[in-house]
């Protein structure tokens, strides 16, 4: 007996809506000066960060993700019940299981959707975007919600000045739909992981290797650990290298990119990467000053900033680039169709 082969559509996938949400509470550099041995000048000069938004106790990643998703749906004018899949990129799920995507699905009332979480730290959003795009491009789904959301304050040691000044909480969501006649949408991507960098940026406690115990907590193993200098150098080199590969194989140069939306980990990393690519600063979206590093949230939040500032228009060629724990590197090329 032969299986019935379903005809495949060959539509592309495009981002058709964007939503973003950050919690209202602010943690400024002045606040941090009272908590650890740091100062506003050091933080601004070394990172570009002025403030971050943090959740109140009891607010979790799914809550931020739901707010971003609601705004994304409202901007597109559709109901949550129309979603077919929800992918949540995060390293701070509400809990190990159920997946945050399940909690988001329930809170949104997205009755018809399936979904899952994707763990790729700061590259989580671009990785989830590709997976969602493939679901649309294959013809399997027509409405896929991709969310990048993290409550980094839940895994930070606020006595460690080398990490606590860097991160914030936030979420961004995009809707993926099939392209229409004449539209291009998602074009190409180059992703890379390198687990040899695992020990440079990680949270050692709470997993199957070191299940939570009084000892792991006393040893602060449930917090982010980072070798900042090592990560900095690889981040610049790899984001630039993969961006160049992606542009070259699509016969483009930095001059053809209208809007560069990089992961927001450090303003100096962003500017050094842009310089290597020969990308003028006015085409680079930077909002780290306001939000800090929200891990999976940074790129959709920066997309939202770009839209608000009128720096992202239909027909623009857009380059995304990310680097994070893993190591994970992601670069994505797309045509903006909104
Ligand atoms: O998104 C995930 C990927 N993560 C990243 O991309 C982060 C990459 N790394 C970085 O962004 C930077 O390495 C940091 C911002 C984390 C650190 O900046 P840096 O320029 O690499 O500083 P450093 O670690 O080399 O430290 C320089 C000095 C040290 O003092 P000494 O040894 O020179 O006396 C640090 O102790 O700055 C000191 N320092 C601070 N001083 C004031 C470190 N943190 C602070 C602080 N306030 N918060």
Image (tube, grey):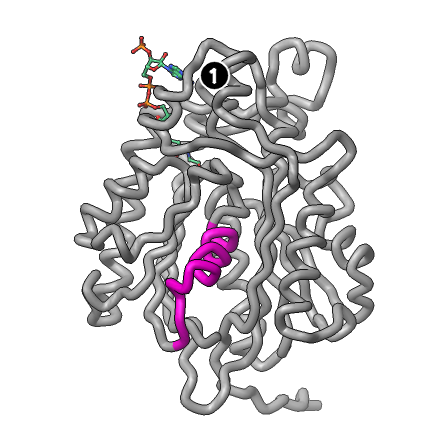
**Eyeballing the image, is 227 above or below 265?**
above
Magenta region? 299-314
Q: How many marks?
A: 1
- Closer to the camera, 143 or 57? 57
Quadrant in which the N terminus is drawn: bottom right
Q: Nearer the viewer, residue 24 or 192?
A: 24
- Note whether residue 192 is visible: no
The secondary structure making up most of the magenta span is: helix
Q: Quadrant of residue 142?
A: bottom right
Magenta stretch containing residue 168, yes or no?
A: no
Q: Name the residue at 42% across, 59% down.
A: 309
143, above or below 297, in the image: below
Q: Residue at x 59, y 32 (%)?
A: 26
Q: Is residue 300 a member of the stretch shown in magenta? A: yes
Classify residue 155 by image quadrant: top right
Q: Position of residue 263 (x, y in %)?
A: 41, 46
Q: Is residue 295 in sight in this rendering? A: yes
Picture residue at 61% right of the left edge, 11% below the top: 219
Does 195 appear above or below 175?
A: above
Apparent side of residue 69 relative to residue 299 in the rendered image (left or right):
right
Q: Position of residue 16 (x, y in %)?
A: 54, 73
Image coordinates for residue 12, horizontal then vertical, percent:
47, 80
Tag 1, which secondary structure?
A: helix
Question: Foreground residue, 131 or 34?
Answer: 34
Residue bearing mark 1: 161
- Residue pictured at 62% horizontal, 50% vertical: 21
Which image quadrant is residue 43 in?
Answer: top left
Whether the residue under disc 1 has CB within 8 Å of ligand 1? yes
């Amino acid at each position: 007996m032969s299986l019935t082969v379903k005809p495949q559509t060959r539509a592309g996938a495009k981002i058709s809506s964007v939503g973003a949400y950050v919690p209202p509470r602010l943690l400024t550099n002045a606040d941090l000066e009272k908590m650890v041995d740091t100062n506003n000048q050091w933080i601004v000069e070394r990172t570009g960060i002025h403030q971050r938004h943090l959740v109140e106790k009891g607010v979790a990643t799914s809550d931020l993700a739901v707010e971003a998703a609601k705004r994304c749906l409202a901007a597109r004018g559709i109901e949550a019940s129309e979603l077919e899949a929800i992918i949540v990129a995060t390293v701070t799920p509400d809990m190990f299981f159920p997946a945050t995507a399940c909690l988001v699905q329930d809170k949104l009332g997205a009755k018809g959707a399936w979904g899952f979480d994707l763990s790729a730290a700061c590259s989580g959003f671009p990785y989830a975007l590709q997976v969602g795009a493939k679901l649309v491009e294959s013809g399997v789904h027509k409405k896929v919600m991709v969310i990048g959301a993290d409550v980094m304050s839940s895994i930070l040691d606020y006595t460690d000045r080398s990490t606590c000044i860097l991160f914030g909480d936030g979420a961004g969501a995009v809707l993926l739909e099939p392209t229409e006649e004449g539209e291009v949408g998602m074009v190409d991507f180059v992703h890379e992981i390198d687990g040899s960098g695992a020990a440079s940026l990680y949270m050692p406690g709470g997993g199957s290797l070191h299940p939570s115990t009084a000892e792991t907590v006393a040893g602060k193993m449930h917090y982010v650990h980072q070798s900042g200098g090592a990560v900095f150098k690889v981040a610049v080199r790899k984001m630039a290298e993969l961006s160049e590969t992606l542009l070259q194989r699509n016969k483009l140069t930095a001059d053809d990119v209208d809007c560069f939306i990089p992961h927001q980990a450090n303003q100096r990393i962003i500017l050094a990467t842009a310089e290597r690519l020969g990308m003028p600063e006015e085409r680079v979206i930077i909002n780290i000053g306001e939000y800090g590093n929200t891990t999976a949230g940074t790129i959709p939040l920066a997309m939202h900033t770009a839209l608000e500032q009128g720096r992202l228009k239909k027909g623009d060629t857009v380059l995304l680039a990310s680097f994070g724990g893993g190591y994970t590197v992601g670069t994505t090329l797309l045509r903006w169709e909104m």
